[in-house]
Image: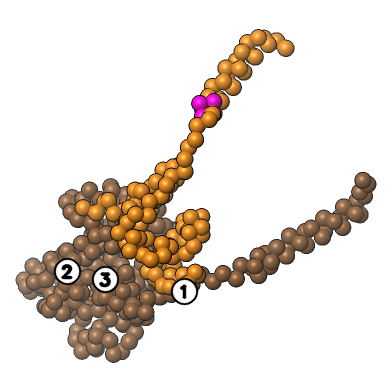
Chain colours: A brown, B orange
Amino acid sequence: MDINRRKFLKVSGVFTLGLGLLPLGNALASNKKVKYAPNPKALKAKNWAMVVDMNKLESELDECISACHKTHNVPDIGNKKEEVKWIWTDSFESLFHDIEHGHLTGKIRHKNFLALCNHCENPACVRVCPTKATFKSNDGIVMMDFHRCIGCRYCMAACPYGARSFNFKDPRPYLKEINPKYPTRTKGVVEKCNFCSERLAEGLLPACVEASKNGGLVFGDLDDPNSEVRKILDSQYTIQRSYSFGTKPKVFYIV
Amino acid sequence: MYNSRNIIIGLVIFIGIFTLPFVFGIGKKNDAPKLSLDTPKINELEAKECIEDTDFMRSNHMKLLSEWKVSVVRDGNRIYVSEKDGKEYEMSLENTCLDCHSNKEEFCDACHTYAQVEPNCWSCHVGPEEVK
């Protein structure tokens, strides 16, 4: 068999061309269609937001918190340093430090206010996340993809609202009961409120909203002028936590 | 060859130790795990078939689950339309897969242990035996 330079180049040229056409052939051969679809029952919105009416909510704070934490398997570590929380209460001074001027009525100063992730329109946590584990979804919810979280805690440093918690240890031993419908987290993962995106997908309102029977929590589409949330915002004076930071939070308060 | 005696003895010992596991395994059979489909939910089914063909599921369930994860969390699509018959399923490990395969130990774990695969699904997703 004799092969000269010219022949070799010709043959290898043909083979290279064939290799280049391979992806095309593959694409034609696999006409399998994998289809994913949203749940038709899902509640839809462009920009989910919440109004916290503290006048109606005051007696139901504990119910709201426990409804959320039971639904999402949030552990009770029992230690302030390592606590994990999605929704919690704190004083006006802590939550609204920039508008607390020292001469507020005692009623406001001693009241406990509900706090949760603000699902900001311009979220600082999303900007800093190196793995895109936290991201803004199409419906305006700041979501966590726990699968991708590497536990670097940049997001915790970035969030001005303290809405994020880190799992310093395996949370499972600290759960009184496990809700099998929702996963727990594992050691080394950051977690926070997800506006119950898994419940919205089934057509249910968030667990805390459902638990606030007096209507202290109102949930709706901020971009829809006819939504419940917008009706309240258009008719009443509302405040936000640390508006001046420019993160554009989407949890509004009536105090 | 210098020191040929020592070298050859050393080589024989080395090869002997190295092949020991194979020598012990000669003539032994390691049966593939038998996966149990004996759960109340599966027994109710007329045709005992998964959401896709058994062969496809056997070789591709991990890819499918990985795609589900992205689709559900990232894109908000929570319904899977089966290629087999167009039936719709909720994409959820806990609520769909484990609803039928409620015997995780005899089904998932049996094969994973045999193949020495350690999927990290269960560090967060709740298996039926962990529900208190």
Residue A239, position as x, y percentages in the image: 22, 78
Q: Residues within 10 Å of mark 2 (few under 14, many from 20)?
A: many
Identify the chain of the residue marked 3, using the numbered disc in the image: A
Q: Nearer the viewer, residue A75 or B125?
A: B125
A206 left or right of A89 in image: right
The image quadrant of residue B7 is top right
* Distance from Cα at disc 2 to Cα at disc 3: 23 Å
Task: Give the residue drawn at x 65%, y 67%.
Answer: A29
Q: Residues within 10 Å of mark 1 (few under 14, many from 20)?
A: few
**Which amino acid lies under the numbered mark 3 shown in the image of this protein?**
Ser
Q: Find numbered disc 1 in the image and state the secondary structure of the residue it sits on.
A: loop
Identify the mark at residue A156; answer none if there is no mark.
Answer: none
Dot 3 corresponds to which residue? A242
**Which amino acid lies under the numbered mark 1 shown in the image of this protein?**
Gly
User: Is residue A122 located in the magenta-colored stretch of the structure?
Assistant: no
Q: Can residue A37 be seen in the rendering of this structure?
A: yes
Dot 1 corresponds to which residue? B86
Whether A231 is drawn above or below A77: the answer is below
Q: Find numbered disc 3 in the image and state the secondary structure of the residue it sits on.
A: loop
Instruction: Quarter of the image for the N terminus of chain B: give it.
Output: top right
Dot 2 corresponds to which residue? A64
Whether B26 is drawn above or below A155: the answer is above
Circle nearer the viewer, 3 or 1: 1
Q: Are marks 2 and 3 on the same chain?
A: yes
* Distance from Cα at disc 3 to Cα at disc 1: 49 Å
Circle nearer the viewer, 1 or 2: 1
| First in residue order: circle 2 vs circle 3 | 2
* Distance from Cα at disc 1 to Cα at disc 2: 40 Å
Q: Which residues are magenta?
A: B21-25
Q: Find numbered disc 2 in the image and state the secondary structure of the residue it sits on.
A: helix
Residue A245, position as x, y percentages in the image: 32, 70
Label pair 3/1, CB-CB below 8 angstroms = no
